[in-house]
Amino acid sequence: MSAAPPGRDRWRAVRPLAHRDFRILFGAVVLSISAAGMWAVVMVYAVIRIDDDPVQLSLVAAANAIGLLACAIPGGIAADRLPRRVILRAVETANVLAVGSVVVVGQFGTLTIVHLTIVSFVLGAGAGFFFPSYSAILPRILPAEHLLPANGLEGAVRPALQQAAGPAMAGLLLAALIPSQAAVAVLLAHAAALVLLLFLRPEPAPAPADASDGAVSGRSIRHDLVEAVLFTIRTPWLLWTLLFATIWVLVTMGPEEVLLPFVTRERFGDDPRLFGFLLACFGAGGVVGSVVVSSLRMPRRYLTTMTLVWGLSTLPFVIIGLTHEYWLMAVSGFACGFGFSYGNVIWGTLLQRRVSRHMLGRISSLDFFVSLALMPISMALAGPLSTVVAIPVIFIVAGLVPFVLSLIVLWIARMPQDEIAHPLDDDEEGSP
C-alpha cells in the first residue's frame, strides 16, 4: 500500500480494505444490503400473492418509508451520543426478528397485509438508525484520503446487491418457492451480518483536535438538534441540495418502487425474473457509476458535478414510461443507476469532509429526514394516482422535473463559487 502520485493510484478504490475494522464493517454492510435487495422483490410478490392491487403495495412500501423517516432524526442523535457499533448491532438484531416472523408465519399460518406492513415499518426504522451510524463511524476508523474510495465501495455494492444480485436471486427463488420460503435467504443474510458486527472493535479515542467528538455531557437533545438544523440552514450547498433531493424523491420514488413492477408485468409478462433483472440493470449502472467516481480524485467542481449528474440521471425515466422494448427499458435503468450512484458517492464524502465529526451523525440523519420527507407521500400516492393519470405521463414528469430543478439549485445556492472557495482534494480536509 505504498504511496503513489495523486490521481494515478490504480489501487485507490480498494485502499480502505487495508483497515481491519472497515473490512468487518464492509462485510456486514454487504450482507445487509443483499438482504434488503432480496426483500424488495420478496415483499412485492408477497403482497401480490395476498392481494393483487397496487394500492396494497403502496401501503406496504409507504410503511417502510414512514419507518425510515420517523427514525432518521433519533438515529442521528443516537449516532452522536452512543457507540456506533452498538447501534449497528441492535439494528441487525431487529431485522433478524422482523424477517424471521415472516418466515415463521408463512410456514405455519397465513401472512396478511397488516403483518407485512409492520415488518416493512421495522426494516425502514432500522435503516433510519443504521445509515447515520455507518456514515459517522467511517471518518473515525479511516483517514480522510480513504473516505471517497470507502464511499465508492459502499456505493458500488449497494446497487450491485440491493438492485442487481439481491433482486435477481429473489426472482430465481420466487420462481420455485412461495414468498415466505424465499424470505429464509433474507433472514440468513441479516443473521450473518449481525455475527460479523460482533467482531467490530471500539472506535479509537478522538484526537485532541476533536475533543468535542462524542462529548455529550451537559448537552441536551434539543441543543443537539438545534445545532444541526442551524448549521444546515446557514450552509447553502447543504440546504439547497437537501431541498432538491426532497422534490426528486417525491416525483421519482413512487413510480420506481410502486408502479414499475406493474409496468413490467403489463408490457413484458408475469415472470418475476423480468422485474428482478430489470432492477439488476439499475444496480449494474450504480456499480459502474460508483467504481468510476471512486477510482478518481474528488472533482474540483464537486458540487456542480454532483448536482448535474443527479439531474441528468432522471431523464431516462421518460423512456421507461414510454417504451415497450425491454432492452431499452433496461438500458434506461442502467443510466439512472449510473448517475444516481455517481452523485451519491460524492455527496457522502462531502458530508464526511465538510461537516464536523461531533455532529456528523445528526447532519446525516437530517439528510435522510429532509431528503426523504416526502417518500411516504410518493409511495402512498403512486398507486391511486395511476388510476386517474396515465402511467407514461407519471414517468415523464418524474424524468423532467428533477433535471430542471438541478439547474435552478446550482444558481440559487451559488455552488460554483462555493466549491472554488472550499476546495477538496485527497490531501486536505477542506472546511465548511
Image: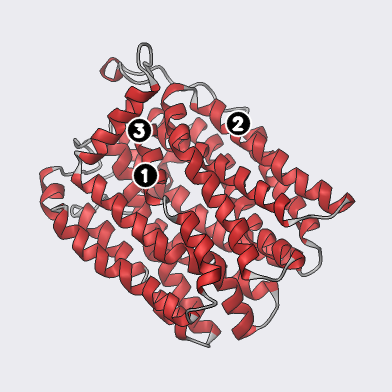
As drawn, 426 above or below 417: above
Q: Are marks 3 and 2 in contact (CB under 8 Å)?
A: no
Cα separation between marks 3 and 2: 20 Å
Residue of label 1: 367
| Residue 431, disc | none
Q: Which residue is at 19% across, 38% downward?
A: 234
Residue of label 2: 89
User: What number of labels is visible?
Assistant: 3
| Residue 360, disc | 3
Query: What amino acid is found at the position of numbered circle 2 in the picture?
Result: Arg
Q: Position of residue 11 (x, y in %)?
A: 39, 48
Left or right: residue 391 versus residue 276 is left
Using a 10 Å C-alpha cutoff, classify the residue at mark 1 as few (fewer than 14 neighbours), some (14 to 19) or many (20 or more): many
- Identify which residue, 178 or 334, lies in the foreground: 178
As drawn, 169 above or below 210: below
For the residue labelled by badge 2, is the local secondary structure a helix, a strand or a loop? helix
Q: Which residue is at 76% across, 60% downward?
A: 179
Query: What amino acid is found at the position of numbered circle 3 in the picture?
Result: Leu
* Quarter the C terminus occupies: top left
For the residue labelled by badge 1, is the local secondary structure a helix, a strand or a loop? helix
Q: Position of residue 146 (x, y in %)?
A: 36, 39
Left or right: residue 16 versus residue 380 is left
Query: What amino acid is found at the position of numbered circle 1 in the picture?
Result: Asp
